[in-house]
Image (tube, rainbow, N blue to C red):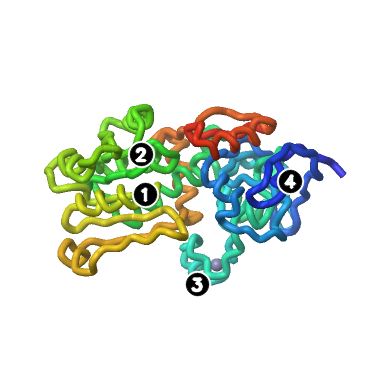
């Protein structure tokens, strides 16, 4: 049986180690992809810690979901012409038969099969096998690293902007503006003509956040007067019309809520089990405010993300390149807060 090298997790919350494992074969309806780039980031660290599933029956497991590569084999029932196709991966394992899937809201699948890299082996490996419908087209002109970022880091912001209906007269506050999602969200909101306030907490991160475009103004979230600073930084002095929280810090979120403009929308992306946002019902009515949850992206939005990075309208920030051997230590540094949180495995 042919073998390959992969990064394997022994148990949720346990250790990652590089091992030699059997190379997977695609089952009917599946494709095997020669992995050329896979994001290494906090979403995967959260999965490694058991934040998506802590079912011991799912380990040992090869993590990694945000990836791009070249189809190198197909299972029965899949068009053999797909061999050689450049693809990027859709993160969710969906049923494709429920009403949500059939209307295109694949992120709302009601017979959800879990996550690629959690419920089945992922792409911290030389090759990865996934359902054929999860391997989406990566256009010529996109690097594999950019395609890997597009699969989640750009697709998720597209979904957020659709959820909040971001338009040209909006001022979008991004809490966590230098992060992987925040940095690309600033760019996607800019494509819709919006002004962006990028809030973050270190000088380095604030400087990085502003490199997302001319339309971006960094706002220091560390000060005592964050809410006032936000209002002052909006072009008409009436506060942000859209707030996108990628962090989940409640003090920061309450300040943003206080600064929110009339008709404002707050979008939450975080999944902390133990934190709740509490505001009086009257406050929603008086401001005609909305609090909106946003969950990953649809398959269609991943295809759109791939096109945006391919034609250069979004500059994908893939971060530092890592070998398979460097991935376990990078996760240790992620856990310790010693990295920017953005790396890309090039196996
Ligand atoms: Zn479904």
Q: Is 4 placed left or right of 101 in the picture?
A: right
Which residue is located at x 63 percent, y 54 percent? 118
* Mark 2 or 4: the one toward you: 2
Q: Nearer the viewer, residue 70 or 273?
A: 273
Q: Is residue 286 above or below residue 272?
A: below
Marks 1/4: CA–CA distance: 44 Å
State which tag comes first along the sequence, 2 or 4: 4
Can residue 115 be seen by looking at this rendering? yes
Residue that label 3 marks: 99
Residue marked by disc 2: 177
Quarter placement of the N terminus: top right
| Residue at the image point whose x is 25% and y is 49% from the top | 255
Q: Residue at x 49, y 42 (%)?
A: 150
Side of 229 where 251 appears, left or right = right
| C-alpha span from label 1 to label 3 | 35 Å
Q: x%, y% of residue 127? A: 71, 41
Choose between 277 and 141: the one closer to the eye.
Answer: 277
**Dividing the image into four equal quarters, which quarter contains ligand 1?**
bottom right
Q: Are marks 2 and 3 in contact (CB under 8 Å)?
A: no
Task: Please tell me which of labels 1 and 3 falls first in the chain.
Answer: 3
- Which mark is in front, 2 or 3? 2
| Residue to which mark 1 is pinned | 249
Please identify, in this view, whether the residue under mark 3 or under mark 4 is nearer the observer. 3
In the image, residue 301 sits, relative to residue 233, either above or below, namely: below
| Alpha-carbon span between mark 2 and mark 4 | 39 Å
Which residue is rendered at x = 54% and y = 71% of the image? 98
Is 308 or 331 nearer to us in this picture? 331
Query: Label 3's element?
Result: helix
Q: Residues within 10 Å of mark 4 (few under 14, many from 20)?
A: some
Instruction: Name the residue beneath numbered marker 4.
Output: 73
Question: Disc 3 and disc 4: Cα gap in Å?
Answer: 31 Å
């Amino acid at each position: 049986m042919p073998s390959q090298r992969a990064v394997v997790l022994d148990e949720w919350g346990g250790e990652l180690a590089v091992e030699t494992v059997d190379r997977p074969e695609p089952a009917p309806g599946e494709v095997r992809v020669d992995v050329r780039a896979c994001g290494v980031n906090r979403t995967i660290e959260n999965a490694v810690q058991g934040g998506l599933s802590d079912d011991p029956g799912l380990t040992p497991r090869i993590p990694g979901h945000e990836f791009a590569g070249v189809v190198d084999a197909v299972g029965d029932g899949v068009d053999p012409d797909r061999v050689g196709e450049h693809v990027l991966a859709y993160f969710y394992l969906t049923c494709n038969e429920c009403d949500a899937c059939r209307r295109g809201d694949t992120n709302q699948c009601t017979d959800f099969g879990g996550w690629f890299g959690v419920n089945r082996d992922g792409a911290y490996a030389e090759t990865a096998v996934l359902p054929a419908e999860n391997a989406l087209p990566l256009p010529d002109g996109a690097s594999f690293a950019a395609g890997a970022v597009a699969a989640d880091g750009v697709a998720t912001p597209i979904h957020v902007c659709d959820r909040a209906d971001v338009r040209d007269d909006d001022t979008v506050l991004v809490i966590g503006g230098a992060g992987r999602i925040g940095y690309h969200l600033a760019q996607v909101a800019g494509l819709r003509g919006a002004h962006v306030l990028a809030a973050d907490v270190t000088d380095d991160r604030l400087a990085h956040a502003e490199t997302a475009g001319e339309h971006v103004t960094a706002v220091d979230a560390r000060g005592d007067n964050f809410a006032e600073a936000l209002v002052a930084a909006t072009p008409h002095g009436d506060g942000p019309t859209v707030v996108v929280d990628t962090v989940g810090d409640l003090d920061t979120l309450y300040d943003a809520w206080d600064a929110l403009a009339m008709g404002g929308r707050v979008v939450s992306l975080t999944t902390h089990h133990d934190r709740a946002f509490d505001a009086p019902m009257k406050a929603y009515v008086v401001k005609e405010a909305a609090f909106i949850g946003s969950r990953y992206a649809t398959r269609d939005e991943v295809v759109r993300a791939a096109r945006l990075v391919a034609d250069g309208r979004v500059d994908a920030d893939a971060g530092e390149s890592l070998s398979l051997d460097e991935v376990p230590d990078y996760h240790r540094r992620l856990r310790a807060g010693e990295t920017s949180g953005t790396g890309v495995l090039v196996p």
